[in-house]
Amino acid sequence: GQQVMQIPQYQHVQEGEDFTTYCNSSTTLSNIQWYKQRPGGHPVFLIQLVKSGEVKKQKRLTFQFGEAKKNSSLHITATQTTDVGTYFCAGRTGGFKTIFGAGTRLFVKA
Amino acid sequence: ETGVTQSPTHLIKTRGQQVTLRCSSQSGHNTVSWYQQALGQGPQFIFQYYREEENGRGNFPPRFSGLQFPNYSSELNVNALELDDSALYLCASSLTPTKVNTEAFFGQGTRLTVV
């Protein structure tokens, strides 16, 4: 079945360092969404990418969708302690079903 | 806040029992999806309801069932609870599933513990 793999599982960074999480799908996606979940909280929508090769920025966050629409990345520049949480990618194949990756948990040391 | 509310927030049940979880979708949203999130894992898609009909289902057994009501609120029912059903159950509401751009708004979740 369709799988969405996300790496790394964990990332420890010093505040001010950059962070990147990668997402790979076994099948071509119609879109990919990114969510952030704080400890004890629920996933919060960050962004959706639809077009091949699309790049979107939100302040210090940069999201990319691969040319083949099978991979994606989230890059955070100069991390802050408020960036702490788990970042999930979620891919959709054109139907109703959204497949979440296992997430990357970000720890930021002040 | 997303406007999606779930109840109860926490629940403890005994193996073999049945449970009903509830979700009120965001105003204007007619699609509700349910997810199971085990500790340290990503949300796993259970099923989706659109205009009171089940629109699709993930790899969950038939003892997981649901309903959607005319006001688009939804219920998730789980029969014959097993220990492995212990998880955070998330409800997400969104606009019609036929659109490509379907941002999902999650509720706070129901933490179910089966003992």
Image (cartoon, grey):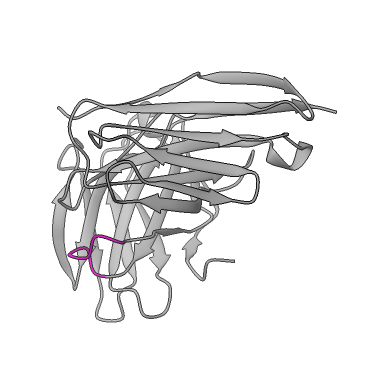
Task: Identify the residue at image location x=25%, y=37%.
Answer: A69
Task: Identify the residue at image location x=49%, y=50%.
Answer: B110
Q: Quadrant of residue A7?
A: top left
Quadrant holding the N terminus of chain A: top left
Q: In the visual, does B48 lie left or right of A44?
A: left
| Dominant secondary-structure state across the stretch colored magenta | loop
Q: Quadrant of residue B86?
A: top left
Task: Identify the residue at image location x=22%, y=65%.
Answer: B99
Task: Identify the residue at image location x=48%, y=61%.
Answer: B6
Towards the viewer: A4 or B58 = A4
| Residue B40 shows in the view | no
Query: Is the residue B21 above or below the residue B73 in the image?
Result: above
Q: In the visual, does A27 lie left or right of B88?
A: left
Q: Position of residue B65 (x, y in %)?
A: 21, 52
Towards the viewer: B78 or A9 = A9
Q: Farthest residue to the right: give it.
A: A110
Magenta region: which residues? B96-101
Quadrant holding the C terminus of chain A: top right
Query: Is the residue B42 above or below the residue A93 in the image?
Result: above
